[in-house]
Amino acid sequence: MRKITYAEAIREALRQEMKRDENIFLIGEDIGIYGGAFGVTYGLINEFGEERVRDTPISELAIVGTSLGAAITGMRPIAEIMFMDFTTLAMEQIVNQAAKMKYMFGGKAKIPMVIRTPAGSGTGAAAQHSQSLEAWFTHVPGLKVVMPSTPYDAKGLLISSIRDDNPIIFIEHKLLYKISGEVPEEEYEIPLGVADIKREGEDLTIIATSIMVQRAISASKELKKEGISVEILDPRTLKPYDKKTIIESIKKTGKVIIVHEACKTSGFGAEIAAMISESESFDYLDAPIRRLGGLDIPIPYNRNLEKHAVPQIEDIINATKELIYG
Amino acid sequence: MKLAREKLMDMLSKMYKIRFFEEKVDYLFSLGLVHGTMHLSIGQEAVAVGAVSALKSDDYILSTHRGHGHCIAKGADINLMMAEFLGKETGYCRGRGGSMHIADIESGNLGATGVVGGGIPISTGVGLSIKMRKTGQVILCFFGDGAANLGAFHESLNLAAIWKLPVIFLCENNMYGMSMSVKKAIAIKDIAKRADSYGFPGKVVDGNDVLAVYEFVLKAVKRARKGEGPSLIECKTYRWKGHSKSDQNLYRSKEEIRSWKKKCPIKRFKKRLISENILKEEEIKMIENEAKEVIEKAVDFANNSPEPSVDEIFEGVYS
């Protein structure tokens, strides 16, 4: 099958969906001629014009509010917030307005909007351009949180997100934009709330999100050389998330490591760990649940410090061996 | 400006309904029948009615925490409003929203928000949607003097200006943001003047004169429909009651409140209708009584409505 990058897969989903439905439009900072800070929307303005690929001033709160107002009156906006860190500027509209509106209006509003935003460190952009804030959004009923780790998932999940009638936080990763993978040319949906087993294995389950799925895959290749067979499970959607697939995998392997880039304290791994310990899979565990997450520090600038701040392939390998060998 | 007699009667009727609705819910609250708090707009009826009367029925409004008047002016079903107040399943929001979140999206009432200024960025999106769908509608966004100092105000008015969106930003300046006097909160005399910095018209109106509000909003509506962009209208008015139910009125004098009560927008409108021989005293009395009756019936409807079911507590979180 044809291989394209994660960024190209997202762009293709946007292009195909915009061709299919003229109510879809893009809104965000520098998404037009510039193509977005990471080039994801590059070229779309030539195809769809500046009405539907709408550059805005630097006004994150208004970008989200404008998307919301458009969504409740018949449009299907897709907002880009240039860095996930900048969603903080739009929190009022995301958390108090978009997430609450349907429920507090008695279920009547339809809110088909997607907020695309890149998270993650590794680009040397330091503390205010490197955060992974997904756990915040999973704490807000009314939102859905999607976090693809491969080009294939990025396209299918984005198409599903665009067709969904709820506000969706679609979290991309800067370091994933350039990775390649097989992606069908035609449109396809990946249902939200369904996990994917990226590698089947017997000895231990690694539950990983976003870039950590790629790192877990690299780690699994090394571990295989030592005869350790790991299962890699990507929830793909954090809200709602697929508890059943997690439980089944743990019942099979009896050991679990949860790994994400976001700070470990109150990270989404804590939710998964708690869910496991409350579930029937707890009885199948023959080692403590292990979490790998970012250090509780702002992301530092220095290359080595930055790398040290979030889980790397070696950390996953080491943690796996510790659990396997006891 | 000449308005049809029926239109004027409708406006007066709505002003009465707002007044009586709020007096009634105030009373129900005193009996302990209303859960939570409420923000009454008694004294500000001319703003809601004057502004919404300048819209067509398919135009949109966005309301605020002090939004009962906006809903009634937009033609809300008072039964469903009252049921929502009493937290009933038959209420506009199935008892999930309460006083601060009454919405009726199908009729163009895109709802009230409990966060000051929260509706302003949404109105910009509604304006954009109208423009992209080419429907010729407008959106009128109510907000208070307090909201005019938020970042949301600046971001949104700027976007509406650069894209020439059909938005009427209607600032209901009732002189206080909770206890904060507008004189202490803003260094300029008129909030409307801020429109200059975005490049569209800003006008100050006597917010206790329903016909003046109507006239100014109508001009802004016409401008918006022609594709000439947004307007900011500042209606100066006064809230007679406290900010919410916890308010002891420590920040203003009884004299001040009394002086504004003398400027009652309903009495003023009534006087004008009589002096211009549009309505007779008896006709006005009839409108008044009808309004009272509608409110009483709404209380009965709400009282006889079922409570929402706990089994359905999750309904409405997601589509």
Image (spheres, coloured by chain):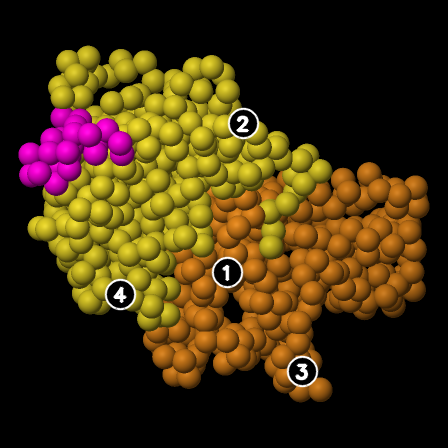
| Foreground label between 1 and 3 | 1
| Secondary structure type for disc 4 | loop
Q: CA distance from mark 1 to mark 3?
A: 25 Å
Main secondary structure of the magenta stretch: helix
Q: Is residue A174 above or below residue A86?
A: below
Q: How many marks?
A: 4
- Residue positioned 52% across, 56% down in the render: A110
Res. B82 in view: yes
- Name the residue tied to disc 2: B303
- Name the residue tied to disc 1: A113
Chain ID for label 3?
A
Chain letter tied to orange: A
Q: Are marks 2 and 4 on the same chain?
A: yes
| Secondary structure type for disc 2 | helix
Q: Which residues are magenta?
A: B263-287
Q: Are marks 2 and 4 in contact (CB under 8 Å)?
A: no
- Residue positioned 36% across, 35% down in the render: B68
Q: Which dot marks residue A184?
A: 3
Left or right, residue B273 beside residue A38: left
Left or right, residue A292 beside residue B91: right
Left or right, residue B52 beside residue B67: left
- Residue positioned 39% across, 73% down in the render: A53
Q: Which dot marks residue B163?
A: 4
Chain ID for label 1?
A
Q: Are marks 2 and 3 in contact (CB under 8 Å)?
A: no
Q: Nearer the viewer, residue B87 or A73?
A: B87
Chain letter tied to yellow: B
